[in-house]
Amino acid sequence: MTKPVTVTFTDLALDDIAGVAGRVAVFVTPDGKLDKPARRVNRLTKGALARMIEEGVLEDMKDGDVKTLAWPSGLAAKALDVVCLERNADALTARKAGVALGKLKEREPMLILASQLRRPVDVAQGIALRAYAFDDHKSDRKTDAPGDVTVMVANPETARAEAAPRLAVTEGVFMTRDLVSAPANHLTTTEFANRIKDMGDLGLKVTILEEADLEKHGMGCLLSVGQGSVSPSKVAVMEWMGGNKGDAPLALVGKGVVFDTGGISLKPAAGMEDMTMDMGGAGVVTGTMRALALRKAKANVVGLVGLVENMPSGNATRPGDVVTSMKGDTVEVINTDAEGRLVLADVMWYAQKTYKPAGMIDLATLTGAIIIGLGHENAGVFSNDDPICNKFLRAAEAEGEGAWRMPMGRAYDEMLKSQIADVKNVGGRAAGSITAAQFLQRFVTEGTPWIHLDIAGVASVKSDTPHAPKGASGWGVMALNRLVADHFEAD
């Protein structure tokens, strides 16, 4: 998988600045004040920083913005990046500055002169998050080291301790991005399961349920989605039990449709290539579990992902077929392109019956309707429990990952009534995201706090996001990790 850049924290060494290759970043407050390392850089560059300020460059810059001086006189570096940032900037603004630097980094080393900043680790994490490129399938793929990031700080030991779990989360984000970016002929259900198996080396207990196991458990909904494909359907289970023995775990459930043609209800050809990202929910769950294992979270969390491929064939489920869920409910399949909820229904039921979780969160690129409602700025949040929902919303806000709560209600259940089965899998165009959530709620046991996250609009996008280049964003890993850290870790 793509590895984040190596970040090293060191003491401030003013005499080393002049000879550093690559890029050097200094920080200037919005009112033009230079800190100690910036003053040294100003002297080395014969007053270039002071001239920038005098000429009003900062007037056009917001907190976290960067201006670059190419091949600055007096420095060996090819570029001097001047960052406009308050010394006491909040976490998200400091991370924004890091993201701006990460966007410029490319593959050269970078020195960050952050000894006077309150939040140098947030800057470093921003750089690591943004310095990402998925080039696994390019013939001219860069194989050389991407160039380390050295951050000069006031207290390196403290910074290292604070940064270690942050960089572990960044690695989880990168795994999610890699999974979502991978083409379907490479990331088959079997390959996805194999990548999850490899995480057993991190201390996760990994179990792969094969089709025979799924049949034994009665997962007729999930199996109906994959029966038209030559790729076998699977459920991968990842257990991290780092909390108190006997404490009920938090369950994370992900939709892992490695490619979605729509099945017999075939999608239009235009844009179908984007359906390699329809396993985005499973990607977020997998990346989150990697992050928790890497940082040795003191929490009990189980991640479960349903891995299928939705293809049309002589064996594929037809519109009008009736399938039976693990719960026992029968489902009339009106539209085979509404397949994600069928996958989630069985995996959610299995998660609850097997682990009796303290709470359950499912993630899925589930509906186009959520994009119509919220665009690409926010994931849709649906829940049966205000406390856990509010905790997640606060975690998402703290990490700068957009999330917006949507309504639910019994009236929407009327749209899912079937004449020949217990329920239909779709309820029509109106309130499409809400009826999808209502369908899933049928498979939530009484008393289980539950959140459904519809991430269709945020999992992979056509323009840069706050923390990533265009493409797979890795949305959700940081928010879920924050939720676990704040509310599910043992004392």
Image (spheres, rainbow, N blue to C red):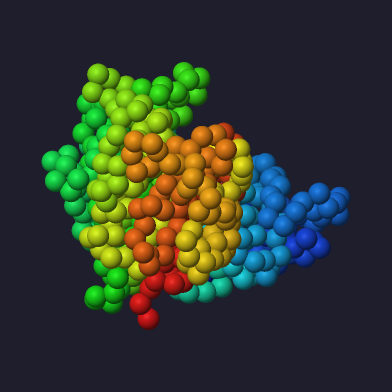
Image point 38% across, 73% down: which residue? 489
Image point 61% across, 38% down: which residue? 372
Above or below: residue 323 compared with residue 443? above
- Percent across and percent down for residue 368 are 52, 36
Q: Quadrant of residue 365?
A: top left
For residue 130, say whether it is visible: no
Image point 48% across, 38% down: which residue? 427
Residue occupying the far right of the picture: 55
- Percent across and percent down for residue 382 are 51, 54
Q: The N terminus lies in which quarter of the figure?
A: top left
Q: The C terminus lies in which quarter of the figure?
A: bottom left
For residue 49, say whether it is visible: yes
Image point 67% across, 70% down: which residue? 88
- Percent across and percent down for residue 110 are 54, 51
Q: How many marks?
A: 0
Q: Is residue 95 left or right of residue 44?
A: left
Residue occupying the far bottom of the picture: 491
Above or below: residue 20 compared with residue 448? above
In-front residue for pair 2/473: 473
